[in-house]
Image (cartoon, grey):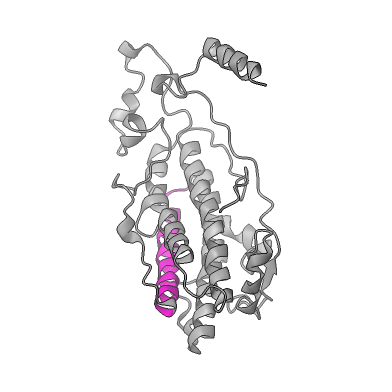
């Protein structure tokens, strides 16, 4: 089971105005081949299907722990996309075409398929595909795949960061650059423990210097490049058998936090009457509240 916590991993600033094209670019980091839906589902199915969990527990703990973090990454990217949709359209009589701005946007799914919110697909509107999941059952092969997957994901984050100067998008990407770089190193260390091969000698692939990105630097300063989390579960503490020593990039000591990120409030998005979302007006709310109270 996954214990859900009603927080984002970091706070995201609400933009002053909408930026739907930035949202469309960020979609690649959600539902693209190297997006967060892919990292989540790769590690999730590998953890579900992991053989000899007790005998190879440190490796299982590592994959399971990163799985839990990736769920939060999917949540974070989705909320960034939703914030980037702020104020793009406005309520109005249907005959005034209140959604007409969506007609000229390159990602029309925001206006036709969702309530101007994240879509489980890539930046071109293609739905996320289960073919993006690799779970061979061979521990070393899967760890190597995860290592390369994180490198690919990092490359895409760098590129999307360079596509937009939107502060909401960049805050989210800056954080994920730091955490994704951490996962690259984690899988490199796991491969070294399993095989004796110093895969880390191939780093940086690409350049892992997060300090080149202004919106990543503050997360580096917080030491988030050097930690993995147990999520408060004693079952995952054996990741310390792999995640130890010094960070090969910073030279700083690696540590396992027996807990989780501090987190920040999840944005509460306003009504979108022109999208019939949530489709509950004041009278509906009063009736729902009355029914809820009657069941207490």
**What residue lies at 51% left-to-right and 14% top-to-bottom?**
281
**What residue lies at 32% left-to-right and 39% top-to-bottom?**
107
Specify whether residue 146 is painted magenta. Answer: yes
Q: Quadrant of residue 101?
A: top left
Q: Nearer the viewer, residue 216 or 56?
A: 56
Position of residue 138 relative to residue 15, above or below, is below
- Whether residue 133 is visible, yes or no, is yes
**What residue lies at 65% left-to-right and 17% top-to-bottom?**
293
Position of residue 168 relative to residue 154, above or below, is above
In the rendered image, residue 117, in percent from the top left (x then y), is placed at 43, 36
Q: Nearer the viewer, residue 98 or 127?
A: 127
Task: Specify the principal SS of the magenta part.
Answer: helix
Q: Nearer the viewer, residue 38 or 212?
A: 38
In the rendered image, residue 195, in percent from the top left (x then y), is placed at 48, 87
- Magenta-tinted stretch: 140-165
Specify whether residue 200 is painted magenta. Answer: no
């Amino acid at each position: 089971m996954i214990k859900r916590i009603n927080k984002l991993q970091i706070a995201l600033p609400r933009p002053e105005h909408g930026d739907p094209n930035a949202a469309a670019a960020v979609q690649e980091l959600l539902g693209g081949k190297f997006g967060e839906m892919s990292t989540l589902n790769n590690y999730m199915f590998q953890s579900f299907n992991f053989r000899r969990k007790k005998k190879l527990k440190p490796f299982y703990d590592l994959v399971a722990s990163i799985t839990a973090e990736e769920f939060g990454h999917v949540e974070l990217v989705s909320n960034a996309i939703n914030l980037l949709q702020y104020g793009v359209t406005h309520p109005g009589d249907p005959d005034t075409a209140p959604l007409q701005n969506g007609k000229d946007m390159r990602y029309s799914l925001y206006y036709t398929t969702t309530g101007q919110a994240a879509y489980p697909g890539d930046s071109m509107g293609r739905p996320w595909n289960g073919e993006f999941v690799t779970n061979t059952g061979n521990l070393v092969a899967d760890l190597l795949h995860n290592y390369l997957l994180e490198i690919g994901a990092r490359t895409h984050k760098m590129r999307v960061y360079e596509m937009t100067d939107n502060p909401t998008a960049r805050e989210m990407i800056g954080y994920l650059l730091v955490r994704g770089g951490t996962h690259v190193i984690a899988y490199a260390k796991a491969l070294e423990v399993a095989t004796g091969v110093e895969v880390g000698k191939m780093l940086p692939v690409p350049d892992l210097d997060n300090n080149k990105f202004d919106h990543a630097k503050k997360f580096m300063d917080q030491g988030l490049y050097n930690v993995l989390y147990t999520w408060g579960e004693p079952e995952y503490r054996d990741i310390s058998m792999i995640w130890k020593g010094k960070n090969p990039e910073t030279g700083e000591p690696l540590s396992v936090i027996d807990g989780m990120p501090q987190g920040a409030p999840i944005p509460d998005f306003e009504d979108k009457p022109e999208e019939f979302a949530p489709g509950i007006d004041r009278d509906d709310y009063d009736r729902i509240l009355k029914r809820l109270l009657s069941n207490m």
